[in-house]
Image (cartoon, rainbow, N blue to C red):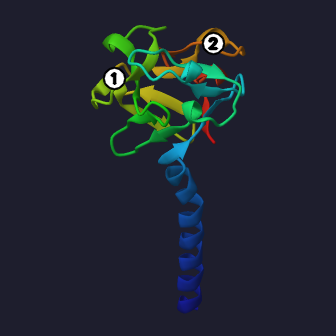
């Protein structure tokens, strides 16, 4: 009887480990960020590669300007086209502050926490979340930071 209980408990633990693994694994690597409200992707418009270029959303096409690498260890989100990192520009901490790209220096304004369970991407400097401004569903709408509220314009999926 005791052996059967051990086998059942071991089986349950194995199932729980398998269920928990994909969420953390899905947040580290190269992929697209899709917005839940607009179903469009985070991108660097026009494949811009210069510092301080503002981020936006556009219909998902999977091009290098829409591909990002997220590192769970550093919190950096790096664009595959430009090699630059996503940051809250000018170290601003107010709602509506622009988000764009800049050479990767690893400052707190370039560090992001991703929560796969909620889809929120939160800046470590300001504590605010990445969102599509004004709930826009249009191509080229700006992506900014805003106080985290969990609305669909702040929810991102890792595709």
Based on the displayed image, in which of its 4 quarters is residue 127 positioned? top left
Could you say where residue 148 lies in the image, as x and y percent from the top left?
A: 50, 20
Crowd rating for badge 1 (residues with CA inside 10 Å; few <14, some 14–19, many 20+): many
Rendering coords of residue 9 (x, y %): 55, 77
Q: What is the secondary structure assignment of the residue under circle 1?
A: helix
Residue marked by disc 1: 109
Query: Residue 116, relative to residue 137: is it above or below?
Result: below
Query: Percent position (x, y) of residue 21?
Result: 53, 59
Query: The N terminus appears in which quarter of the rendering?
Result: bottom right
User: Within the image, what quadrant is residue 125 found in?
Assistant: top left
| Residue at horizontal 70 percent and vertical 23 percent from the top | 37
Which residue is found at the position 68% from the left and 12% from the top? 136
Residue 25 in sight from this viewpoint = yes
In this picture, is 21 found above or below 142? below
Residue 149 appears in the rendering: no
Q: Mark 2: give few (<14), some (14-19) or many (20+) Cα within 10 Å.
A: some
Task: Looking at the picture, tell me which residue is in the foreground, 44 or 50.
Answer: 50
Residue depth check, mark 2 versus mark 1: number of the one nearer the observer? 2
Residue 16, position in %: x, y? 57, 64
Quadrant containing the C terminus in the rendered view: top right
Query: Which label belongs to residue 141?
Result: 2
Does 132 sit above or below residue 79? above
């Amino acid at each position: 009887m005791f052996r059967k209980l051990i086998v059942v408990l071991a089986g349950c633990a194995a199932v729980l480990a398998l269920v928990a693994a994909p969420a953390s694994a899905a947040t580290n690597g190269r992929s697209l960020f899709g917005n839940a409200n607009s179903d469009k992707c985070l991108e660097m418009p026009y494949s811009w590669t210069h510092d301080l270029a503002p981020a936006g959303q556009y219909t998902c096409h999977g091009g290098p300007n829409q591909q990002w690498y997220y590192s769970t260890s550093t919190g950096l989100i790096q664009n595959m086209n430009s090699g630059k990192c996503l940051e809250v520009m000018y170290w601003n901490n107010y709602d509506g502050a622009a988000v764009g790209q800049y050479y990767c220096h690893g400052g707190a304004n370039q560090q992001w926490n991703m929560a796969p369970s909620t889809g929120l991407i939160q800046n470590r400097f300001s504590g605010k979340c990445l969102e599509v401004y004004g709930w826009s569903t249009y191509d080229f709408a700006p992506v900014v930071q805003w106080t985290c509220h969990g609305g669909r314009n702040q929810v991102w999926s890792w595709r």
